[in-house]
Image (spheres, rainbow, N blue to C red):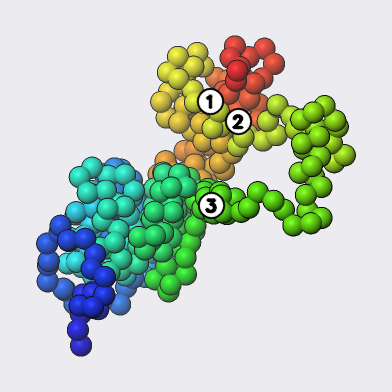
């Protein structure tokens, strides 16, 4: 039987493969995973997390796309976890070659819609953004990807949906079918001073902490003002973005107990008694705060 990873001679040919070929080892019964990320701490954390499951074995780690392809070609894993931004051969460049060997899940901090779209076009079976999944959810995603079920974390799904809506809007015609243009007409009238009959109230004040987080990022001077350590500042950023203790623990590769200890120290330094109060002070929106969003 011909190797299924080799394209048919009559099919469109992919770009020349810049990688090398390696022999194929024997298969095992455990779910075999290759972890590719240029951050050694992230790699070690993912490997420890996955290897702790009885039915999962991390057969190799890789620091870039080239190493990921070498490892996948040699070990023939069931799933590849692949970062996007890596030195040398990045994840997006290696993706078309890796998907010929095994299903690939992008596991990254990048949630830009263009990157999500490109990953899907090149064959990714899922897209998980750090900080948006628990350890158990990651394990479930790896198992499901092996069965052909796609997985997306919220920001990746949102980026994909926004891109699809943008493309649909670009394709739509300027004129609406009869009966659907009434509100559009009201908008035009409003531009000339008339009031809308069905206004959509808007407020300049944010309704949730997740709306605040992308607007401001604390600088080292802000951190010094509150006398937070680098780790405490990192955790405070996660709190301000609306993450739970469990999500923070998974992102930082620490225990929930350690997260709680950090939060207790943060609350003491910010003179706060709740997450919302601490986040408001951290982001400069609390009454009497030394910093504002403007």
Q: State how far apart marks 3 and 1 are (Cα).
A: 29 Å
Q: Residue at x 20, y 45 (%)?
A: 88
Crowd band around label 3 with a 10 angstrom C-alpha radius: few (<14), some (14–19), many (20+): few
For label 3, the SS is helix
The residue identified by callout 3 is 167
For label 1, the SS is loop
Q: Residue at x 26, y 70 (%)?
A: 12
Report the front residue among 268 and 236.
Answer: 236
For label 2, the SS is helix
Q: Position of residue 27 (x, y in %)?
A: 23, 77
The residue identified by callout 2 is 212
Q: Position of residue 158 (x, y in %)?
A: 55, 50
Crowd band around label 2 with a 10 angstrom C-alpha radius: few (<14), some (14–19), many (20+): many
| Callouts 3 and 1 close, C-beta under 8 Å | no
Q: Position of residue 271 (x, y in %)?
A: 61, 19
| Callouts 2 and 3 close, C-beta under 8 Å | no
The residue identified by callout 1 is 216
Mark toward the start of the polypeptide (2 vs 3) = 3
Report the front residue among 192 and 34.
Answer: 192
**Which of the two marks, 2 or 3, is nearer to us in this view?**
3
Q: Is residue 102 above or below residue 180?
A: below
Q: Residue at x 53, y 52 (%)?
A: 167
Report the front residue among 227 and 103.
Answer: 103
**Residue 57 in sight in this render:** no
Report the front residue among 86 and 18.
Answer: 18
């Amino acid at each position: 039987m011909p190797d299924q990873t080799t394209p048919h001679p009559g099919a469109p040919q992919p770009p020349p493969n810049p990688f090398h070929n390696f022999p194929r080892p024997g298969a095992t019964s455990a779910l075999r995973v290759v972890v590719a990320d240029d951050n050694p701490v992230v790699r070690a954390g993912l490997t420890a997390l996955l290897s702790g499951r009885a039915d999962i074995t991390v057969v190799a780690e890789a620091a870039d796309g080239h190493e990921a392809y070498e490892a996948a070609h040699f070990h023939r894993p069931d799933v590849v976890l692949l970062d996007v931004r890596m030195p040398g051969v990045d994840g997006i460049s290696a993706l078309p070659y890796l998907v010929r060997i095994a299903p690939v899940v992008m596991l990254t901090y990048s949630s830009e819609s263009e990157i999500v779209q490109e990953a899907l076009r090149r064959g990714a079976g899922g897209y998980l953004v750090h900080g948006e999944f628990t350890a158990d959810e990651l394990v479930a995603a790896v198992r499901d990807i092996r069965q052909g079920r796609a997985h997306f974390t919220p920001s990746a799904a949102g980026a994909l949906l926004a891109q699809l809506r943008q493309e649909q809007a670009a394709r739509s015609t300027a004129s609406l079918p009869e009966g659907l243009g009434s509100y559009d007409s009201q908008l035009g009238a409003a531009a000339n001073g008339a009031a809308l009959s069905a206004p959509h109230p808007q407020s300049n004040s944010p309704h949730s902490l997740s709306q605040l987080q992308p607007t401001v990022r604390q600088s080292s001077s802000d951190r010094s003002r509150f006398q937070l350590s680098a780790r405490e500042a990192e955790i405070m950023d996660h709190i301000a973005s609306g993450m739970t203790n469990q999500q923070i623990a998974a992102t930082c590769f620490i225990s929930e107990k350690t997260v709680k200890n950090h939060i207790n120290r943060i609350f003491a330094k910010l003179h706060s008694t709740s997450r919302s109060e601490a986040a408001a002070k951290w982001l400069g929106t609390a009454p009497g705060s030394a910093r504002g969003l403007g």
